[in-house]
Image: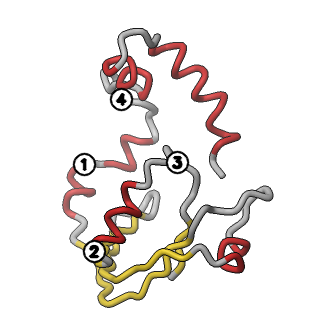
Amino acid sequence: MLIPDRRGNSLIDGLRNLVEDPRIGLIFFVPGVNETYRVNERARISADADLRHRFAVNGKEPATVMVVTVEQAFVHCPKALVRSDLWKAASGGRPQGVPTLGDFVAARDPGINSAAFDAAYSQRIPNELY
C-alpha cells in the first residue's frame, strides 16, 4: 500500500514518529457505512521521484510517500459508530455549539478573529488540498 504525504502544516510530526517506530495502525472509514476496517502494518518513508510522480494532483507531487507493508487486516468493531449516528449527524450540517477551526485558532491567539479566519480558510482550502 502506498500513502502520499499530502500538503499539511509542514510539522512532519507523523513522519517523525514513523522514523522512530515503523509500526503503524490505520482505521478506514467508509462514508455512510457503519463498519470500519483496521490494518496493522510497518511503513517506511520514500522520496522516490517515480513514486511521488504517481501521486501528483494538479501538477503537485507529495513531498514523500509512505510505503506500507500490511501485517494484519480485519474488521473493527462498529458499535461506537452505530451508537454515535455519525453519518446521520453529518448530513445535518455542523452541530450547534461545536467550535470551528477559527474558534480553536482564536483561543490560542486572541489577536485572531475566528469568523474572519473561518471565511478565509473556506476560500483558501480548495486551492491547498494538494
Labels 3, 2: front one:
2
Labels 2, 4: front one:
2
Labels 3, 4: front one:
3
* Picture layout, residue 59 above or below residue 89: below
- x, y (%) of residue 117? 52, 19
- x, y (%) of residue 37? 34, 74
Real-space Cα separation, disc 3 to disc 1, in angstroms: 28 Å
Using a 10 Å C-alpha cutoff, classify the residue at mark 1 as few (fewer than 14 neighbours), some (14 to 19) or many (20 or more).
few
Q: Which mark is residue 21?
A: 2
Towards the viewer: 1 or 46: 46
Mark 2: which amino acid?
Asp
Left/right of residue 79 with respect to residue 88 in the rendered view: left
The answer to which of marks 2 and 1 sits earlier in the sequence is 2
Which residue is the site of mark 3? 8
Q: Which mark is residue 95?
A: 4
The image quarter in which residue 6 lies: bottom right
Mark 1: which amino acid?
Ser
The answer to which of marks 3 and 4 sits earlier in the sequence is 3
Labels 2, 1: front one:
2
Mark 4: which amino acid?
Pro
Which residue is the site of mark 1? 84
- x, y (%) of residue 77? 21, 70
Mark 3: which amino acid?
Gly
Towards the viewer: 1 or 99: 1
Using a 10 Å C-alpha cutoff, classify the residue at mark 2 as few (fewer than 14 neighbours), some (14 to 19) or many (20 or more).
few
The image quarter in which residue 127 lies: top right
